Structure formats: C-alpha cells, structure tokens
Image (cartoon, grey):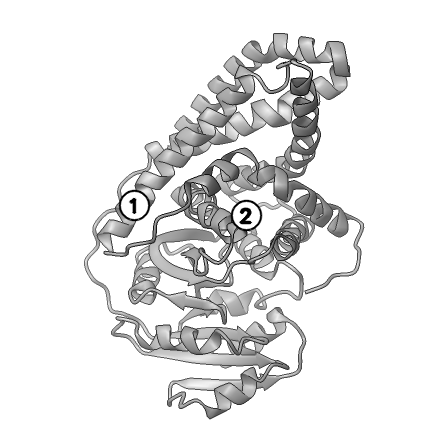
Amino acid sequence: MFLMSTILSLLYLICAICININWINDIACYLGYFLSIYLVLFIALIPGFIFVFMLISLLLRKKEKKTTSTKEEDVTILIPVYNAKKTIKETIESIRKQKYCGNIYVNIIDDGSTDGSLELLKNMKLGPKITLFESDHRGKAYALNEGLQNVKTDYTITVDSDTVLHPLAVRNIMHKLLNSDKKTVATAGCLFAKNAKKSFITKLQEWDYTLGIFGVKLYQGNYNSTLVAQGAFSAYKTKFLKEIGGWKNCVGEDIVLTWEFLSKGYETNFAENAIAFTEVPETLKKLGRQRKRWARGMIEAFKRVKIVTSKDLNFKSKFLMCLNVFFPFMDLALLIFLPLGLIFLAFGNQLLIGWLTLLVILLGILLCLVIDIKRKNMLRKIKCKLEKRSILAFIVYVLLYAFILAPYCLTGYISELINSKKKW
C-alpha cells in the first residue's frame, strides 16, 4: 500500500510539473523565476503530491481483521489539571460512564490551579479508584510525569481536563492497542470539537477536526506511524513510557514523546472509533496561540529527534516526518500567493487564481469527501451521531482556513528556531 501510494503520487507530481511549466513561465514575466518557481512548487505541486498520497493511502486502506475479544486489561488514566474548574467534573463523569470491564484507575494531578479546581476536586466524592495529587505549577509535562510515577497498571491513558469521552472510548482505544503489533506502544484516540457551535471560529475547527486532523491520523495510522499521540486522549504501554523517561518539559510534549517512540523503532497507530470531545479555542486569538504552540512543537520534535541519522526509525515514519518539512514553506507561499492573486484579479488578470489553482482546490475537496465518508461509516458502527456542520464554515475552511492560520504557524516555527522564550 505504501509503495503503491508513493509511486502514484510521484507519477502525479511528474504530470503536474509538465502541466505547470507554462504557468511558471507566465508568472515569471511578472515576479521573476525564483518567486514563480517557489509559489508554484509550494502552492500547487507539493500540496497536490500530499493530497494524492493521502487519497491513495485511504482508498487502498485495508479493512481491519476481526479479532476475537481479548481480556480488557486494567488501565490508569492520567488527567493533568490546571484551572479547569468549569470542565473537570464533566470529564470525570464521562470516565465513570465507560463501558469497560477492566479496572479503570484515575490519577488526577492538579498543577497549581488558581481558579478553585483543587477545592472542587477535594469536595467531590471521587471514589477509591481515583487519586488526587497536588503539585506546584510547573507545566503539563511535570504533572503527567508525576502521575506516571504512581501508575501500577501495564497500560496508561492520558485525557485532558476539558475532554469528554464517548462511552466506548476506553474499550475501543484499548482494543486497538492490545490487538496491534507487539512493536506498537501508543495509540491515538479520535478527537472532535466539543464546543463546535460556540462561534464561527469553533465551526471552522469542527471541520478541521472531522476532516483535516481525522484524515491525517487515519492515513498515518495505515502505516503504524501516527506522528502525534495527542495528550488530550491517547493510550500507551506504561513500560515504554517509563523507558523513555515520560514527557519532556517542552511546548509540544506529546509530539516529542511520539517521535521519540518512533525514533527507537516502535510503532504508533490510530483508533478511529475511540471518540472523545475536546474544548477548542473560541476566538481567533486563542486559536492562533494554540496553532503557534503546535507549530513550535513540531520544530521541537525535529530538533530533539534526528530523523535523518536515526538507525531505528523505519522508512515509512521517516517519510511522513519529512513531509512536515514542507509545511513552513507552504505557509509562507500561501501568505504571498493569495494577496498577490487577489491584486492581479482586481486588475482582471487571472494568472494566479486560475484553473490550475482550482485544480488543487478540487483535489482537496475530493480528499475531504473520501475522509468524510470514512468518518460517517465509522460513526455509524458505534452509533454515534454528530450535529450538522455549517456549510459556510466548510467553504471558508477549504478556501481560507490555511491562509488564516499561516501567520501564526510561521511565528511558531520562527520562535522555536531562534529559541525565543517559551510560554505555556
């Protein structure tokens, strides 16, 4: 499947280069060859290659073999808490409602909350399987590691304090991890937006989570190389978490953790039917801050994990990691391309925003359609219904979402490259 997807994507890239040569020459008449090649490469050629690779990977995706029910192993859930008074109760209640036969232990680590979260937790009837730990405010990684020290089960799950689990979430994520290859040490859960109807910004993210993030994890999971086992909801084999020393104190602690696993030759995958709902930023300012942090986390992972020289990192994981190298260049190209295209268009010149640009957009829409069909099929199997999504938000998501986030992502990349002060 990987070989076929790569070959077909390369064939597409060769054809696309031939088609775009004249376009490059036409743009060069106005902007020069360097800028014209840069724009076409990172607006049309590379995104098209990635879209086709994802599309073929999803279309050739093999159905998972039916496995006989295995014993539902005991598991410990780590919940780092910092100023989560409004959400933590709902998170705990969702854990209590899990349809899981194994024992579920919960380690809640308060990371020096100042909003009354700790007092709320102390006054709740947590029960014998839930343990509350108090800590000074030192960041999410410290809180997770403190909780990890007290894990006695073979399996660990992380859940954010604003995340609500579907009743089958623990069963499905553990089933995926337990029935995977022995080299698999982490399984990412499937996240959707919990507060999707709060604002137009959250409606945009609803599409991002159900198409972009879901689709990326789905195709990466095909190759046992899910690049982010996100802290909001993922399952791990405790032994290997402790082996690498848990989470590193950095902005993208979950990205770095996952890449460290992969660099040691381990595998990570994705449980598409293990659903959780998480709070997403409700304003553009907060969304930008989050995406800046994610972008910075990716650069942190590149700095900490030497993917080129790593001997244990398998080729598939290395290939998928290398695709991320293009993201900063694509974000910059988008920031240059769209304003220039609109200026040209205002003077009646469709040179930049023409049929070749629409071709890439149509390819992206086709990919979205395939992802959405797979998502709906999965939700039908676990009898989970989601509310209807905004059509206007979808149009903005397809045409402008990447452009809106590009400056924040670029700021994140640059901040990490120049080692500016980190803010959590």
Quadrant in the picture for the C terminus: bottom right
Q: Position of residue 130 (x, y in %)?
A: 42, 84
Q: Position of residue 102 (x, y in %)?
A: 28, 75
Q: What's the residue type where badge 1 is placed?
A: Lys
* Mark 1 neighbour class, 10 Å CA radius: few under 14, some 14 to 19, many 20 or more: some
Front residue of 181 and 22: 22
Whether label 1 touches label 2, CB < 8 Å: no
Foreground mark, 1 or 2, reads: 1
Instruction: Please indicate whether residue 202 sits to the left or right of residue 138 in the image.
Output: left
The residue at the point 31 percent across, 39 percent down is: 373
Lower sequence index among marks 1 and 2: 2
Q: What's the residue type where badge 2 is placed?
A: Asp
Tell me the number on the disc at residue 312: 2
Image mark count = 2
Q: Quadrant of residue 211?
A: top left
Q: Disc 1 versus disc 2: distance between alpha carbons?
A: 36 Å
Front residue of 286 and 175: 286
Q: Secondary structure at mark 2?
A: loop
The residue at the point 43 percent across, 56 percent down is: 191
Q: Is residue 378 above or below residue 242?
A: above
The residue at the point 65 percent across, 41 percent down is: 406
Q: Which residue is mark 1?
A: 376
